[in-house]
Image (tube, rainbow, N blue to C red):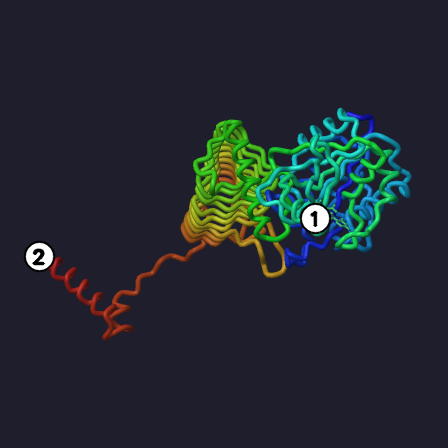
């Protein structure tokens, strides 16, 4: 490639058809904003400089762009006077920042084409440079060209112009080769030509595409390279198109992981974000969503019906019908069905979080188990400990949150409440129904319930005339008869 590569990303338009308070390019698919996908592809090229043109809602869009590419120059286009104007604004902003373009290739991309791949841009730039063209067009041959600028070629096949839909003759509207919007320029030509673009057309806009005619008039070379995979240049203007692109993006991501050795039972109902990382021999069952920066190690089985966001799943772990966020699940651990792992949950190797268990900010040790019907908040549970069914870690006193610590190899019984802050020692035990308010020393058995008393004949006296009393009466009589024999 040329010694210098500049990329200009246009993202000043409003995107009113989204009918949203969120700017179009910030709408998300595959775990990133649309412009986030574009900037990812652009960043992968290692460009000399990147300029993003922002306008509508730039206070949202600008910082978002800088998060992806901190080095990018933001150019503000106050009024959207057309793509040609937008590029002029970009060139001015680069000059003002002391980063004026002084050679090489300039690529123009849009912020709303999330399926665009870096490899395509790299190929296109290389073709453009090999052709020594002043302008190159990434074109596409489509079934339905409506709305796009058409590529007009002469009888030799040389590109003459791009004609916008509104300015096209009926004959030109039949052309199915369209301008994707992605253009490559020789830097010197662009700097010179951009000032010569006028706005004498149907829309009264400064069309960047007029540079094609300008190049031709100067006897310079113009080329167009059709891209086979037209999905890569598709933009989403409304939410229906966003969903279509989102499904296609997901199909591509899922297919890539299957080729890399991941078993996916039902690709249609499996959703994997762009930044998720999976190892070989992971199995994903139907209805699984792996979101954000989730990482899954070898031989883990996830699903069915599981959502994991920013989670880490260890080798050979099993996660069934679970909702997890920012949780770490150890190797060989078991989670679910119907578990809710909230941020700060860490489950050790071979541990278990079972049915109807909610955890938050909880470090559960290797081989430790919370099998049934429990809430574990702000807790540390040592290795090999078993927490009884229906245990509540009462972490909140109405004002502050407190921590509970349970040691190693402890055995706590059913229906306990641990009132934090409290510590249960290594090897300690509790009785069923215990409310632990005081620390339990290592090896001690804690019981907090009083002795059980039975008030004989209570139902017959206090509930006389009810079915309960009648049943008690009958059972008592039967027992008495049995005694007679
Ligand atoms: C443009 C092309 C057309 C191409 C089509 C592909 C021109 C004149 N036309 O048409 O040939 O087939 O894209 O989708 O270039 N933008 C700005 N500032 C502006 C105007 C636009 O930043 O002043 C940005 C928009 O946010 C958008 C992109 O540029 O990301 C394209 O603008 P849009 O108005 O959609 O251009 P089209 O009319 O679709
Ligand atoms: Ca458009």
The residue under label 1 is: 168
Q: Nearer the viewer, mark 2 or mark 1?
A: 1
Q: What whole-number distance in Å separates the C-alpha atoms at marks 2 and 1? A: 109 Å
Question: In the rendered image, is residue 143 in sight?
Answer: yes
Q: Position of residue 368 (x, y in %)?
A: 48, 38
Name the outermost residue toward the bottom: 465
Left or right, 90 with respect to 419, comes to right
Which quadrant does the N terminus fall into?
A: top right
SS assignment at label 2: loop
First along the sequence among labels 2 and 1: 1
Of 189 and 337, the residue lying toward us = 189
Secondary structure, mark 1, is: loop
* Residue name at image x 81 percent, y 55 percent: 79
Residue at 22% across / 65% down in the picture? 472
> x, y percentage for residue 443?
48, 40
Q: Is residue 396 above or below residue 314?
A: below
Residue 203, located in which quarter of the rendered image?
bottom right
Q: Does residue 362 appear to the left or right of 42 in the view shown?
A: left
Determine the residue positioned at 74% across, 43% down: 67
x then y, percent, for residue 115:
62, 39
* Whether residue 405 can be seen here: no
- Which quadrant of the rendered structure holds the C terminus? bottom left
Near-viewer residue (152 or 384): 152
Q: Residue 102 — which label? A: none
Asked if disc 1 is less than 8 Å from ligand 1, the answer is: no
Q: Is residue 263 above or below residue 87?
A: above
- From what the image shows, is residue 416 above or below residue 410? below
Residue at the spot 64% in from the left edge and 43% down from the top edge: 32
Q: Is residue 87 left or right of residue 238?
A: right
- Is the distance from the Cβ of mark 2 to the nearest ligand 1 atom less than 8 Å? no
Q: Looking at the picture, how far across and down is residue 38, in whole percent?
A: 69, 40
Which residue does the numbered mark 2 point to in the structure image? 485
């Amino acid at each position: 490639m040329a010694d210098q590569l500049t990329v200009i990303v246009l993202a000043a338009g409003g995107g009113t058809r989204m009918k949203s308070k969120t700017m179009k390019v910030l709408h998300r698919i595959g775990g990133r904003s649309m412009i986030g996908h574009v900037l990812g592809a652009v960043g992968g090229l290692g460009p000399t400089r990147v300029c993003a043109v922002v306008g509508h809602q730039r206070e949202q869009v600008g910082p978002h762009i800088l998060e992806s590419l901190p080095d990018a120059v933001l150019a503000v286009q106050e009024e959207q006077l057309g793509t040609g104007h937008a590029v002029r604004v970009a060139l001015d902003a680069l000059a003002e920042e002391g980063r004026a373009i002084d050679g090489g290739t300039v690529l123009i991309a849009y912020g709303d084409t999330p399926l665009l791949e870096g490899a395509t841009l790299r190929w296109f730039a290389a073709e453009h440079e090999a052709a020594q063209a002043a302008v190159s067009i990434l074109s596409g041959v489509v079934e339905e060209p409506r709305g796009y600028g058409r590529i007009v070629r002469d009888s030799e096949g040389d590109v003459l112009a791009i004609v916008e839909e509104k300015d096209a003759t009926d004959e030109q509207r039949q052309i199915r080769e369209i301008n994707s919007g992605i253009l490559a320029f020789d830097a010197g030509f662009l700097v010179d030509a951009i000032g010569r673009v006028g706005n004498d057309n149907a829309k009264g806009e400064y069309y960047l595409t007029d540079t094609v005619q300008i190049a031709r008039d100067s006897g310079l070379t113009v080329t167009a390279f059709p891209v086979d995979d037209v999905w890569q240049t598709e933009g989403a203007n409304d939410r229906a198109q966003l969903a279509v692109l989102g499904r296609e993006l997901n199909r591509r991501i899922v297919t890539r992981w299957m080729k890399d050795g991941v078993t996916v039972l039902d690709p249609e109902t499996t959703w994997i974000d762009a930044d998720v990382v999976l190892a070989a021999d992971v199995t994903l069952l139907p209805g699984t969503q792996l979101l954000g920066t989730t990482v899954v190690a070898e031989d883990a089985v996830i699903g069915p019906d599981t959502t994991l966001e920013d989670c880490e799943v260890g080798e050979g772990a099993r996660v069934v019908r679970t909702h997890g966020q920012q949780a770490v699940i150890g190797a060989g651990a078991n989670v679910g069905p119907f578990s809710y792992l909230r941020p700060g949950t860490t489950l050790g190797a071979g541990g278990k979080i079972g049915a109807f268990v909610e955890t938050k900010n909880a470090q559960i040790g290797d081989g430790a188990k919370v099998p049934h019907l429990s809430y574990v908040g702000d807790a540390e549970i040592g290795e090999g400990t078993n927490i009884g069914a229906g245990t509540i870690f009462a972490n909140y006193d109405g004002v502050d949150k407190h921590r509970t610590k349970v040691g190693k190899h402890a055995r706590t019984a059913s229906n306990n409440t641990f009132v934090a802050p409290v510590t249960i020692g290594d090897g300690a035990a509790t009785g069923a129904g215990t409310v632990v308010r005081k620390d339990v020393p290592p090896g001690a058995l804690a019981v907090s319930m009083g002795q059980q008393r039975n008030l004989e004949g209570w139902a017959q006296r206090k509930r006389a005339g009810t079915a309960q009393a009648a049943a008690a009466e009958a059972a008592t009589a039967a027992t008495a008869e049995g005694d007679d024999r």
